[in-house]
Amino acid sequence: MIGDGQSLDLAGYYDYYESPVKIVPTPEGGLTAWRLDRWTGGWKPANDIIDEILFAMDGDIFVRTAEEFVQRTEAERGRYLKGEGPIFALYETVRAIEDVAIAEGRPYTPKEAALVKGIRRRTFVMFEEQLRQAGDPGADPTIATG
């Protein structure tokens, strides 16, 4: 607690050495960190890096908005994960849009950028809901909807 009775809000979203990390409050009033596992798409406990993130002076740790965190997480999942089903079909759609832009040597058009952003927001919710159903304590689909 800060002297004026307000609690210090250190929860947030980060890029930690090119990996999405979220720091969230615990019911007991503490903090817990979750780092994206690129190989499963789930969340690994990462409490050992909380201090390093919060007190970082390093150029490899960046604060992100919730929307930037969602987009970054889904870019990683789409790049590293393979599988079947609707989520992976949407990842393929994003990859196809990326491939065309790269082949043509240009950034996304405004329409492509909006489409990719919307797809990633949708896949984030879908993936997080699946993680939650599977018992992943770090899953939170409301990040993309809140």
Image (tube, rainbow, N blue to C red):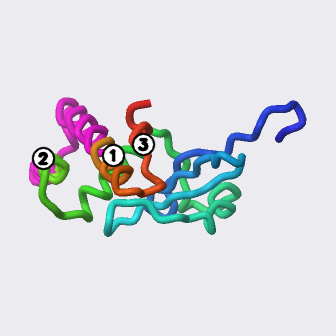
Pointer 1: what residue?
129
Which segment did they paint magenta? 95-124
Judging depth in this view, the residue of 143 and 114 nearest the camera is 143
Q: Are marks 2 and 1 in contact (CB under 8 Å)?
A: no
Label 1: which secondary element: helix
Q: CA distance from mark 3 to mark 1?
A: 19 Å
10 Å crowding of disc 3: few (<14), some (14-19), many (20+): some
Q: Quadrant of residue 141?
A: top left
10 Å crowding of disc 2: few (<14), some (14-19), many (20+): some
Task: Tell which circle, 2 or 1, labels the residue nearer the N-terminal end.
Answer: 2
Q: Quadrant of the C terminus?
A: top left
Look at 55% across and 48% down and name the residue there.
Answer: 63
Toward the right, the furthest residue is 3
Pointer 3: what residue?
68
Q: Main secondary structure of the magenta part?
A: helix
Residue 34, x across and y down, in percent: 51, 58
- Residue 80 belongs to the span the image colors magenta: no
Q: Quadrant of residue 123?
A: top left
Pointer 2: what residue?
93
Along the horizontal axis of the image, is 115 left or right of 76? left
Look at 32% across and 66% down and name the residue there.
Answer: 40
Task: Tell which circle, 3 or 1, labels the residue nearer the N-terminal end.
Answer: 3
Q: Are marks 3 and 1 in contact (CB under 8 Å)?
A: no
